[in-house]
Image (spheres, rainbow, N blue to C red):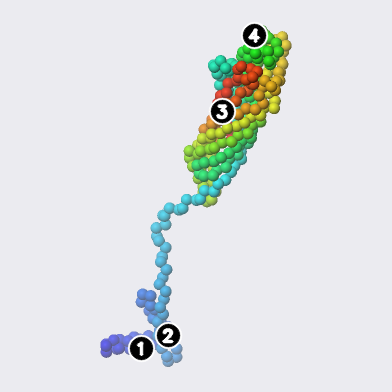
Amino acid sequence: MKKLIIIICITCMSVSAIAQSGVRIGSYQVIVKKANSDTINQIILSEPCLPCPSENNNQPKPKPKFIPYQTTRFFAGACAILPESDEKYYTVLGGKSFSVDAGWHHSKLITRWLAFGGTLQYSFYNYKLRDAASEPKFAEEVIGMDFAKDDIRRQAFRSHNVAVGAFTRLYLVPIQTRAGKHTSNSGRMFIDLGAQGDFAPFKFYLLDTHSEGKKKYYDDYTFNAFNASAFGRVGFGSWAVIARYRFTDVFNKKVLPMDLPPISIGIQFF
């Protein structure tokens, strides 16, 4: 005990000559001040130092939250109408029978994988026929007279349609986001399944003969104004392959016994 008292006295005498000094021991700090002839010893309890940031900054960042959004694009495309050998269809010439589409494509993404959408488009259909004028019922109801085969140059059924459609889209590669914004959809593979309805306000049968020249035949009762189709698309970014199947008849079955082929395959660009 005597030794401890002697050490404290020596320490006080040593620091009395210093204007101000301090010693930190752990979270305690001893400050010695000299004012005139008085020496003040002050002990301060310091708050412990906040933990230093971890040196490991390689922790994975949280994945940005997906925000549903919608897009509208102009699109155009063309399809080839596939000939059918079935007796219930008129013979069409492959390669010369086609459809052309142009319109607006709107889609709303609700998850990274799924979207719903719709289309509004103009469609032109050209069926290049080979034997329709030779079929007795067609010649009677549409043309009103018979023509010899060697007198016919060409014949076709054409229609100008306004169509609306709806579809469901499944992305095979999910949509990504970066800094709260969606990345480009280019290169994203997707599959669309949908249906569309066509209204044909302008439709006619075209017959070009050596004896009579070109004539157009209109018949709103024989040619149906409304049609419905199912379609599927397999896309890659801004283009897609489309297949369409029409499940209604172009010609009125009460008037004509045969119809036009229902399947077409083509490509669309967005």
Measuring 56% from the left and 30% from the top, which residue is drawn there? Answer: 230
Q: Position of residue 84 (x, y in %)?
A: 55, 18
Residue where numbered disc 2 is placed: 33
Q: CA distance from mark 1 to mark 4?
A: 134 Å
Mark 3 neighbour density, 10 Å: few (under 14) some (14–19) many (20 or more):
many
Query: In the displayed structure, would residue 45 be above or below residue 269?
Result: below
Looking at the rendering, which quadrant does residue 55 occupy?
bottom left
Helix, strand or loop at label 3? It is strand
Helix, strand or loop at label 2? It is strand
Residue where numbered disc 3 is placed: 244
Measuring 41% from the left and 70% from the top, which residue is drawn there? Answer: 49
Mark 4 or 2: in front is: 4
Mark 4 neighbour density, 10 Å: few (under 14) some (14–19) many (20 or more):
few
User: In this rendering, would 208 be left or right of 245?
Assistant: right
Q: CA distance from mark 4 to mark 3?
A: 32 Å
Mark 3 or 1: in front is: 3
Q: Amino acid at mark 2?
A: Lys
Q: CA distance from mark 1 to mark 2?
A: 12 Å
Q: Earlier in the sequence, mark 4 or mark 2?
A: 2
Q: Earlier in the sequence, mark 1 or mark 2?
A: 1
Looking at the rendering, which quadrant does residue 202 occupy?
top right
Identify the mark at residue 66; answer none if there is no mark: none
The answer to whether residue 239 is visible is no
Residue where numbered disc 1 is placed: 13
Measuring 54% from the left and 44% from the top, which residue is drawn there? Answer: 110
Identify the mark at residue 149; answer none if there is no mark: 4
Q: Amino acid at mark 3?
A: Arg
